[in-house]
Amino acid sequence: MAVKLAYHANCWGPLGGNAVGVTSVTQLTYRTFADMNRAFADIARAGYEGVEIFDGNLLDETPADLRRKLADAGLELVSTYSGGNFIFPDILGEELARIERVAAAAAEAGASHYVLGGGAKRAGGIRDDDYKRLGEALDQAGEIVRRAGLRAHYHPHLSTIVEGPAEVTRVFGLTDLDFCPDTAHLAAAGGDPAAQVREFSGRIGLVHLKGLQREPFGFTPLDAGDLDNGAVIQALKDINYSGWVMAELDSWPDPFEGAARSHAFLKRHFA
Ligand SMILES: O=C1C[C@@H](O)[C@H](O)[C@@H](O)C1=O
């Protein structure tokens, strides 16, 4: 099994959104408020070959500058990540325009994957046809991403309408997109990430792994917390997964130390 190890650059500062997006949804990118040079240097020093960055950080600079910066650090841009509401027809065109802009920049910067999260929860609660709207929007986004030359993946996420295992199974019956399992989000929502890897064995082209501590709630490096990421890696081996494995950790007191610990864990389990 050939896997390559990558790390998300979201751990070197607070996570947030582009403030202009408060009044213009087409500008509503995700971002990490951090020195990306430091993030890239630490990720490479921890032993990873690739990196994922949020769409907002991607659009901060020209694709050529980003490519140069990553090459200097010895890293490959694997993927970018965008969130979206995806269930409101009035703003969907704006969200898709953003995805088109981001996909073009990501492709030019050398990325091969695009991760999408989201599906908004309404003030009045989830409506049954929100899942159909989400599935259709994801397929449209997927087509845009494919045209740019990237592979699109949907990433279930806490606080969206796709959290628990029944919702995960439902949405993948409504979209053709690949499944990007995020072990901590799936487990926190009551799922069994190893079982979900097996359930969607033919549809996984990128994986997000992080540790989860249930009490008090928090994400951890892969060698800590209550979630058995070793069992998930065994499931990936059993389905002959090959490709990028992306470790991540939204925040950690010493981001380099967190990245290095997860790298050691991955090396041990994929050996
Ligand atoms: O998809 C994600 C985006 C962010 O909410 C966060 O960095 C991370 O936990 C995640 O999985």
Image: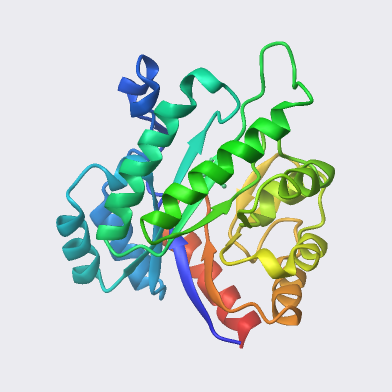
User: Residue placed farthest to the top in the image?
Assistant: 124
Question: Please, is residue 136 above or below residue 245 in the view?
Answer: above
Number of dots carrying numbers: 0
Q: In front here: 178 or 209?
A: 178
Q: What is the image's colouring?
A: rainbow
* Residue 19 position within the rendered picture, expressed as x and y whole percent measured from the top left: 33, 22
* Residue 146 position within the rendered picture, expressed as x and y whole percent measured from the top left: 44, 57
Q: In front here: 124 or 254?
A: 124
Q: Is residue 30 among the parts visible in the rendering?
A: no
Q: Is residue 220 among the parts visible in the rendering?
A: yes
Decide if residue 55 is on the left or right side of residue 132. Answer: left
Question: Please, is residue 163 above or below residue 127 in the view?
Answer: below
Decide if residue 30 is on the left or right side of residue 212. Answer: left
Q: In front here: 33 or 253?
A: 33
Report the residue at 53% width, 52% height from top. 249
Report the residue at 68% width, 82% height from top. 240
Question: Please, is residue 216 above or below residue 10 in the view?
Answer: above
The image quadrant in which ligand 1 is located: top right
Question: Please, is residue 152 above or below residue 236 in the view?
Answer: above
Report the residue at 66% width, 47% height from top. 175
Q: In front here: 140 or 50?
A: 140
Quarter of the figure with the N terminus? bottom right
Quarter of the figure with the C terminus? bottom right
Place residue 206 in its image quadrant: bottom right
* Residue 51 position within the rendered picture, expressed as x and y whole percent measured from the top left: 39, 63
